[in-house]
Image (tube, grey):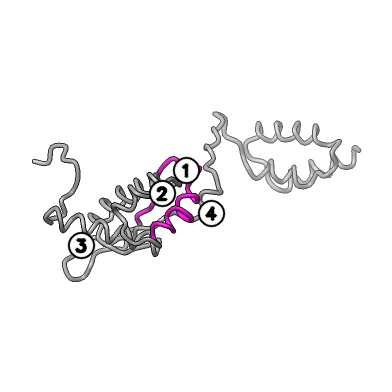
Amino acid sequence: MHNRKGFNRLGRKPSHRKALHRNMVTSLIKYEKIETTQAKAKEIRRTAEKLVTRAKVDSVHNRRIVAKTVYEKDVVNKLFTEVGPRFSDRPGGYTRILKLGKRSGDAAEMVILEFLADEEKATPKKKPAKKKAASKPAAPKKAVEEKVEAPSEEAKVKESAVVDEAAPADTDEALEEKVEKEASEE
């Protein structure tokens, strides 16, 4: 029974598993994208995200801790100069896993593990707007607002929009007649 075990052993001895983690994390940082099985990707993601969190603050101490896992000096340098600063404003979740499907040989679930792109950091998530209780007919309101252009007519547009909401089924012809009447009154 798997009661709260700390990690997936991936069917390997500790030394083999440690070498696998080092190699895959190094490749992920170097190429910023790797293709692997889902089980390996989930374990590598944990290690990679801890290293990126360290790389946000460029200090000798953090470089030495990262160098215990990543043996290539140029990859450590890339982590601290490019990858870490890219995610400086983000509190976590630096990677994503994209599913590819099953491998033909053993039907293992294949995925792509990659770092998030710069664009995603630049676009903040917006909270969804709350919907009003009363349902509005969208088409009549838009037609009235598009026809009226003068700023002094805004109050009349709002009044006519309220009237249109009360009327359940106005046709396009009726709306055009209302707009023409409003235009002729002015």
First in residue order: circle 4 vs circle 3: 3
Task: Assess whether mark 1 and mark 3 are in contact (beta carbons under 8 angstroms).
Answer: no
First in residue order: circle 3 vs circle 2: 2
Q: Is 178 left, or right, of 105 in this rendering?
A: right
Task: Assess whether mark 2 and mark 1 are in contact (beta carbons under 8 angstroms).
Answer: yes
* Badge 3 amino acid: Ala
Tell which tag, 2 or 4, sits nearer the viewer.
Answer: 2
The residue depicted at 71 percent of the width and 35 percent of the height is 161
Q: Nearer the viewer, residue 48 or 177?
A: 48
The residue depicted at 90 percent of the width and 42 percent of the height is 184
Asked whether residue 93 is in view, the answer is no
Q: Which residues are magenta?
A: 75-97
**In the image, which disc is placed on residue 164?**
none
The residue wearing badge 2 is 94
Task: Assess whether mark 3 and mark 4 are in contact (beta carbons under 8 angstroms).
Answer: no
The residue depicted at 35 percent of the width and 60 percent of the height is 28
